[in-house]
Image (cartoon, coloured by chain):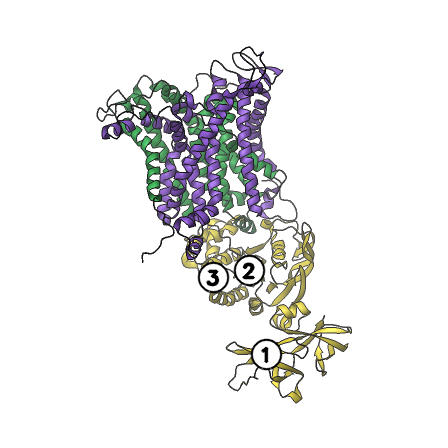
Chain colours: A green, B purple, C yellow
Amino acid sequence: MKQLDLRRFPGFFAITLLCVVVLYAPLLVVSVYSFNASTSITNWGGVSLEWYVDVFTGPESPKFQRAAMNSLIIAVLAGLCATLIATSAAVAMHRAGRFKGKTATFALINLPLMVPEVVTAVASLIFFTAIGFSGGVGTILLAHITFCIPFAYLPIAARMQSVPDSYEQAAMDLYATPWEAFRLILLPLMMPGIFSGFLLAFIISLDDFLITNFVKGAGVETLPTAIFGAVKQGIKPNIMAISTLMLGVSVVFVTLSWLIGRSGQAKT
Amino acid sequence: MAAMAPGGASSSEIYKGNASRLLLPTWVVIGVFLLVPVALMATYSFLTKEFRGGVIWEFSLAAYDQFFLDRGLFGDEPPRIEWTFITIFWRSIWQAGLATLLCLLIGFPTAWFIATREARMRTVWLLIVTVPYWVNLLIRTVSMKFLIRDEGPLNAMLLWSGLIDQPLGLINTNLAVQLGLFYSYLPFMVLPIYAAVERYDFALSEAAADLYAGRWTTLRLVILPVVKPGLIAGCILVFVPSLGAFLAPDLLGGAKSFMIGSLIEEQFKGAAGNWPFGAAAAMILMSIVMVVLLVYARSQTREAKA
Amino acid sequence: MTGTVINIDRVVKRFGTFTALHEVSLDIAENEFFTLLGPSGCGKTTLLRCIAGFEPVSGGQIRLHGEDIAPLPPFKRPVNTVFQHYALFPHMTVLENVMFGLQRLGWSVVDAEGRAKQALELVHLSQFLKRRPGQLSGGQQQRVALARALAPEPKVLLLDEPLSALDLKLRQAVRMELKQIQRETGIAFVFVTHDQEEALTMSDRIAVMSDGHVQQIGAPREIYEAPANRFVADFIGETNLIEVPVLGISDGMAEVSLPGGRALRCPTPLSRAVGQGVLSLRPERIDLCPASEADLTVIATDQVYLGTDIQLKAQLAGGQEMTVRLQNAEATRLPERGTEVGLKLEAGAARLLSA
């Protein structure tokens, strides 16, 4: 008799494959068409790099380069700020024992995840308008820091949970001051979590379109808002080249964070 | 670091007095840039609209009135229920619900398949399924639009193969929006289910088989009930962002698939801007989401107690 | 010399409304292997953490060489701990772990490295300096933890059930080694365990604790042979506890009436007469004898073969269960189940305790 494998269900593998096809087909098609030599996006005219050249030297290139620069600066700054804030919050939530308002604080940290994005966008627009603040990149940065906090917090808190406080106790037993116990023991052990937290916050910031579109000052664009504006007038091949470049950046980042996560695990 | 409290301290006590100092940045940033704005938005929904955007600081229920009641073109007829916006909300709930169902139907088998691989392959499969999520949402949505356009590669391929003799006409339909939402949020479904299946004790399946349950009976009566928390978590994680989604309906849908996100966006961007009305619509959306999350949280605590 | 290194004076520890330590007082001498023994939840680990400085005391004083150390944080106490699960820093090598405390004390890298290597030599781990804790076996990790805590030459070394994570064979080997290291270094060890065998084999003195009270302090032999109360008699080793009427007490000796009517003189910690007491009878100090010479008469109910010993289960006339341990000699003859057997109490078998 054939052995009954209770883990296997007929058709599940096919569905998984379908799932992968659906997930990758659009990205693959766009990447392929970004190398299309034809100016029409419909017909295939042979392989060429002309749209990549266009991205860097074409008439629209200054606009996109400025937008890309904005995106990058905002993502780095928002990621750094959110990671700092989240690290300090994670230390308080996991090391300060019980204190008044802990549950409320936990809810507050996760609030940006619970409020729908479009609501956050509207609320931020109203707030910045009401206080008369239209700092261009400034408003975007503040909004991004806010909604990046829970994303940075998640991996950091998860990591902290797996670091028992007996390590710090052992350090203090061996004459380390609280500050040394933090700097020499807790911080290095938290580092993989902090790094993942930063990467996550960075990517989330880079990804955001809706909130940015609401709060950005006049004439200020990030890459997503610039692309959205361009796409509204139809998908052009240079957009596909930009998309493919961004796709590549994303893949590099995911691989990087995966490798770091793995090395962090291997060490402990 | 602050001075030690006398009498020695456990390591948690190093930070004990400092919780508020460590949390201050979080409180300030999220408080000032999210809590206060949401409160302000709630206030705005009860103010009078200023033409050309903004508000006049005068209390008014006009926004909610306009949302729910139809008083005729000149506002002098007896109020009837205004269906326009309720329909948009209902459609959004429906669309988000269908996208969630689609995610569940595809996501569960996928998560199951991945979780039953050997450890090394699991990581690889998980990576395969999650990598697209890290690609910019706008780019993914644009790619989907490019793929399923009438002149796009999908139709070209199907026409060329002779399976169809005219384009599917998928773009600008509700189905396209659902597909886009599915594409946007699928990993949110797969990951919590995967976590639940990974913890699943296969001795339960063996026990079921021992007690004469077939494969599918075991799935229905044992596996699904046991991994249910994962299924529900996945559904919430897909449904909530789908409900207020903007990009998928805006880029993939047509006039008939207009959703809440676009309705709200219009009030703040378009020429027909009406801030109090937009704030009111956002309030209603947030209320729906909060109700869903509250029901979920309560069922969780009830489960934890049981 | 045998001065007092640690003096614990009426220490109280409360967690909210729960009192973990009720005015615990004890002294630990220099060069001593001192064990805190008790069931889980008795307060032994809490007391250890109070000495280390991880738990502030709610009352009383802890003195190190006569100086109150209660106000000092753990990193200012010349006391080191071997943690239950070792708490070796996973991101540092073995050598870095052992150097850690020395460097915090301001030693130069060269000096710290020298001392750390010495400490690792003491525990026979010199070949693993560059490894990470994760690459070592449980027994090796335990040695690193020991070396790390010993390197700064603390006045007192605290050990929190350090053998509990090891398997049986290893545990027995490490016991002897720990004892030897304690003798070599001359540092006072305060060892926490719930395992009485561990306590009896290694300690110079043992404090038996339960419910936040010290029940008895004494050398292993004293604790075993002269338990101060019913809890200690029952917790350390095996015993039969039988309620008996007390006829009289004088000069540490009691006269009691055994079931069946015979009178018995036995030692007791009690000083004044009580109507009723509990007689503790060690099973290995009871022997079989003809009915005419018997102190007690029982009915044999069952026997358990233990290899070196044979355990005889029996019942007194009142229905109370008794256990007798007989050496498994070739001549050992066991009574049939259900037959009447006479029992003789050897010297030191019985001790009268308060009910």
Q: What amino acid is labelled 3 in the image?
A: Val
Q: Judging from the image, what secondary structure is the residue with disc 3 in?
A: loop
Sequence order check: which comes first, mark 1 or mark 3?
A: 3
Q: Nearer the viewer, residue C243 or B281?
A: B281
On screen, residue B101 versus residue C219, left or right, reads left
Q: What amino acid is labelled 2 in the image?
A: Glu
- Residue that mark 2 sits on: C161
Q: Are marks 1 and 3 in contact (CB under 8 Å)?
A: no
Q: Residues within 10 Å of mark 3 (few under 14, many from 20)?
A: some
Which circle marks residue C341 in the picture?
none
- Residue that mark 3 sits on: C123
Callout 1: residue from which chain? C
Q: Judging from the image, what secondary structure is the residue with disc 1 in?
A: strand
Q: Judging from the image, what secondary structure is the residue with disc 2 in?
A: loop
Report whether residue C292 is seen.
Answer: yes
Q: Nearer the viewer, mark 2 or mark 1?
A: 1
Q: Nearer the viewer, residue C123 or B241?
A: B241
The alpha-carbon separation of the residues under discs 3 and 2 comes to 18 Å
Q: Position of residue C335 (x, y in %)?
A: 57, 84
- Residue that mark 1 sits on: C301
Q: Residues within 10 Å of mark 2 (few under 14, many from 20)?
A: some
- In the rendered image, the vertical position of residue C258 relative to residue C136, given as above or below: below
The alpha-carbon separation of the residues under discs 1 and 3 comes to 50 Å
Q: Position of residue B80 (x, y in %)?
A: 56, 18
Q: What amino acid is labelled 1 in the image?
A: Thr
On screen, residue A56 versus residue C18, left or right, reads left
| Residue drawn at point x = 48 percent, y = 46 percent | B225
Q: Position of residue C126 (x, y in %)?
A: 43, 59
- Location of the N terminus of chain B by quadrant is top right
The alpha-carbon separation of the residues under discs 2 and 1 comes to 39 Å
Q: Residues within 10 Å of mark 1 (few under 14, many from 20)?
A: some
